[in-house]
Image (cartoon, rainbow, N blue to C red):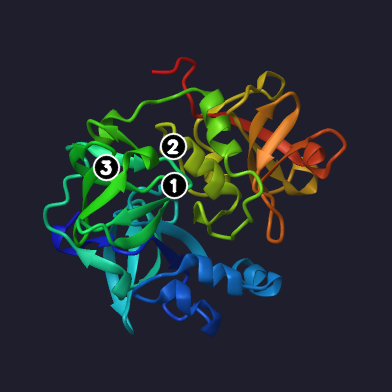
Amino acid sequence: MESNNLWLVNVPVATLWTSYDSAREIDQDAISGSVDMASWLEKLTYETRLQLCDANLVQSQVLFGQEVLIIDEADGWAQVVVPDQPSGKDERGYPGWIPKAQLIQQSDWYIKHGPVVVVTSKHALLFSEKDEQLMQLSYQTMLPAIEHIGDRIRVKTPTGIGILRTEDVVLYPSENKLPKRNGAAIVAAGEQFLGLSYLWGGMSSYGYDCSGFSYNMCRANGYIIPRDAHEQAADGINIDLSEIQPGDLLFFAYEEGKGSIHHVGIYYGDGKLLHSPNTGKNIEIISLEGTIYEKELCAARRYWNNTEE
């Protein structure tokens, strides 16, 4: 990657839009230089949430401190690819558009090699060194760690130094040293989001779509998988439907399992599915028996290891 085109997300959650003119008037809180996710989502009605999908407005989301590669610019927006989100749409990463005001260049970002913290709470407050609240970060935000002092950890952010509470994060030697956990751990990660509203394109603890949910629960346990459901179904280890175990990903297709894949969830065990269903619904655990999902179940994939590190 060309370093002069490598930029960092400088807001808690940057939405990856389909085009630089996809955002609507109601989306201002999501596209400003100081994103307010809670305010944006509170203003969205069922219809305007549904439009994010039906009108193909949104592709994905990217978290504070994540790297993007700028490949073009237009009207104050940057066309980017997201290396952390594998996609068949672009071999460099998931493509889309982000307001340029939500990105910043950082020449010495050392997250790949030095110690890092990962946010393990649903949300974590980032403080300044003067103990001022700077922003609320999402689950799975990862930042370089500088120093552990008592119940606080000093971290490097895209604009300087920040402070996180140790109760909200876990410290690792480097991004490459994140432990690869088992299927039960993937289920446990997902359980904490029961009741969270579905969000098309969602990749943060403010809301997940179906494949964003499976992607992030796998990522939380050491596995980077493709971003979209149909590509998740084509990767990983193929598991016979008679041998599924908790933490396996289950895929669902139109035409009673014979058509194109349209949904993914996490097998919970005991014939149950843990998933983020669709617009207007919340993350839930349901029994597959007797549901449309039972008829549409077409494949299972395993991304986890049998032993926890």
**Residue with the mark numbered 3:** 152
Image depth: mark 1 or mark 2 in front: 1
Q: Quadrant of the N terminus?
A: bottom left
**Residue with the mark numbered 1:** 139
Image depth: mark 2 or mark 3 in front: 3
Q: Position of residue 306 (x, y in %)?
A: 49, 16
Mark 3 or mark 1, earlier in chain: 1
Tell me whether circle 1 and circle 2 mark residues in contact (CB < 8 Å).
yes
Mark drawn on residue 6:
none
**Left or right side of 16 for 70:** left
**Left or right side of 14 for 292:** right
User: Which residue occupies the foreground of this view, 142 or 297?
Assistant: 142
- In three-dimensional space, the C-alpha distance between marks 2 and 3, rounded to whole angstroms, equals 22 Å
Query: Helix, strand or loop at disc 3?
Result: strand
Q: Position of residue 307 (x, y in %)?
A: 46, 15
Relative vertical location of residue 13 with respect to residue 232 in this rendering, above or below:
below
**Amino acid type assigned to the residue bearing label 3 in the image:** Arg
**Amino acid type assigned to the residue bearing label 2 in the image:** Ala
